[in-house]
């Protein structure tokens, strides 16, 4: 008997036992000196507590050891994964978590990789555990250590980080995956293997994710490994994102055009999207690139999007040339007496909004623009429209969604608007194409949960 007075004494002894070379079986036997195997709580209610409240002790260890050696069976659901995230280790001691992941092959192979899929929330998430743990005892340190010694597959960790950035995780929780990816310092060759995911990340609504993707794609381009046509097709959303990322993307597009690595018109049309960027430097870079390509037509077409100072500075001279003095009128033309405008009533606004949204081509028009738009902005617009013409907004959303990719960034925000307005106004969206489209969503992300909630409403429609 080891004489542990409480289970907390056992938890405190774990680092010493591990340092002395204890096997997992030894750790289990030591646990039994203070806690009988049948007393280990593996109820769904207790797992839910561990999945939502941070104990700051390795409370998951008895559960896992009892599975391995005590014959206990536990369902490996999202709560199980979050319980592991929160309590596999100690906030001050790095060795406990690393030891179990090194030696428990089933835990590593079957459960560990789900930390890149289950977001968590509140007290339990990878980002939150690391924020309030000693640097060496956080999950990031654990992953980097196990990658360095070959316990975890480096390429898989890199790809899983990018996959996580393309889920609907909050900026706070997504930041953990960005930091781990950056800390691994992937080479251009490593990053090139995942450039499909990096292209998707360019469309993220999280600025830090967009910046990371732009930097990696720039390194891939510099190494001559960039899939230029695919990049050109996918990079549009980044041209309205963070300033540095937008400038970097424009630089790559200009180089792609110069080397004729992608369709010239597609490159030019993509560059033109940057005219809508709020920063003057990005607008200047876009106009300069278009003029260098001989596409003054696209510059003129985008003139209305440019800041006045940028337009005056860079537009072709003939477009801004002043009227010669001899052509000016001798005196100002008399002002016409226009009728006083009639203010819109709420009914006017409701009627006109409904007419616009109910047009048969409205959803098609939205779908055509979707690749270059942050869908979260549309979500705000549809929410505003629903306040004026709710039925029209619901019907247009129901028609638009099946044309969007299931992994489109910001899709969850659109689904949330549809669910909220459908519930609020008791107008069930049409089934058919929407129902079939919703069936593809699985997993535990916020987007998937919202999609299933809408699907349930569609199923109940008489």
Image (cartoon, rainbow, N blue to C red):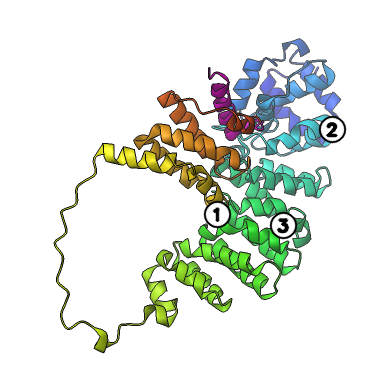
Residue 95: x and y in percent read 75, 38
Which mark sits nearer the N-terminus, 1 or 3? Answer: 3
Q: Nearer the viewer, residue 327 or 140?
A: 327
| Image point (44%, 76%), residue name | 315
| SS class, disc 3 | loop
| SS class, disc 2 | helix
Residue lying at the far bottom of the rendered structure: 326
**Label 1 to label 2, Cα distance in Å?**
44 Å
Which mark sits nearer the N-terminus, 3 or 2? Answer: 2
Q: Which residues are magenta?
A: 440-462
Residue 200: x and y in percent read 64, 51
According to the image, label 3 marks what residue? 185
Name the quadrant containing residue 437.
top right
Quadrant where the N terminus sits is top right
Q: Residues within 10 Å of mark 1 (few under 14, many from 20)?
A: some
Classify residue 72 as left or right of residue 459: right
Mark 1 or 3: in front is 1
Residue 372 bears which disc, if any? 1
Instruction: Inspect the magenta stretch and tell me whether residue 95 lies in it.
Output: no
| Image point (57%, 61%), residue name | 245
According to the image, label 2 marks what residue? 105
Classify residue 120 as left or right of residue 428: right
Q: Nearer the viewer, residue 322 or 207?
A: 322
- Does the rendering let one see residue 76? yes
Q: Residues within 10 Å of mark 2 (few under 14, many from 20)?
A: few
| SS class, disc 1 | helix
């Amino acid at each position: 008997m080891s004489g542990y007075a409480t289970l907390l004494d056992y938890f405190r002894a774990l680092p010493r036992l591990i340092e002395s070379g204890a096997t997992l079986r030894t750790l289990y036997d030591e646990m039994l000196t203070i806690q009988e195997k049948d007393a280990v709580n593996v109820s769904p209610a207790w797992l839910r507590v561990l999945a939502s409240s941070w104990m700051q002790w390795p409370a998951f260890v008895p559960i896992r050891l009892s599975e391995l050696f005590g014959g206990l069976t536990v369902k490996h659901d999202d709560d199980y994964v979050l319980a592991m995230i929160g309590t596999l280790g100690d906030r001050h001691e790095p060795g406990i978590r690393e030891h179990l992941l090194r030696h428990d092959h089933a835990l590593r192979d079957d459960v560990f990789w789900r930390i890149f899929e289950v977001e968590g929330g509140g007290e339990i998430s990878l980002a939150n555990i690391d924020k309030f743990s000693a640097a060496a005892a956080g999950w990031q340190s654990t992953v980097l250590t196990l990658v360095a010694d070959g316990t975890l597959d480096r390429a898989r960790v890199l790809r899983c980080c990018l996959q996580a950035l393309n889920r609907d995780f909050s900026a706070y929780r997504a930041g953990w995956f960005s930091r781990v990816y950056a800390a691994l310092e992937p080479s251009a060759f490593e990053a090139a293997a995942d450039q499909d995911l990096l292209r998707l990340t360019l469309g993220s609504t999280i600025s830090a994710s967009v910046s990371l993707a732009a930097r990696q794609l720039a390194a891939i381009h510099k190494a001559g490994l960039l899939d230029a046509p695919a990049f050109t097709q996918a990079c549009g959303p980044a041209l309205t994102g963070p300033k540095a990322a937008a400038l970097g993307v424009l630089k790559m597009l200009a180089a792609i055009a110069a080397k004729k690595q992608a369709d010239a018109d597609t490159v030019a049309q993509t560059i033109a999207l940057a005219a809508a960027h709020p920063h003057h430097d990005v607008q200047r870079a876009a106009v300069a690139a278009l003029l260098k390509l001989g596409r003054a037509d696209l510059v003129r077409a985008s003139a209305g999007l440019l800041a006045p100072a940028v337009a005056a500075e860079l537009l072709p001279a003939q477009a801004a040339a002043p009227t010669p003095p001899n052509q000016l009128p001798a005196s100002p033309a008399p002002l016409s007496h226009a009728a006083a405008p009639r203010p819109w009533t709420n009914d006017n606004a409701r009627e006109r909004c409904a007419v616009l949204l109910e047009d048969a081509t409205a959803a098609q028009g939205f779908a055509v623009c979707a690749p270059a738009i942050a869908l979260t902005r549309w979500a705000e617009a549809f929410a505003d429209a629903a306040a004026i013409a709710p039925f029209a907004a619901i019907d247009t959303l129901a028609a638009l969604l099946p044309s969007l990719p299931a992994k489109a960034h910001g899709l969850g925000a659109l689904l949330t608007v549809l669910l909220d307005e459908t519930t609020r106004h008791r107008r069930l969206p049409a089934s058919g194409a929407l129902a079939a489209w919703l069936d593809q969503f699985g997993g535990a992300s916020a987007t998937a949960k919202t999609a299933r909630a809408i699907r349930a409403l569609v199923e109940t429609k008489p």
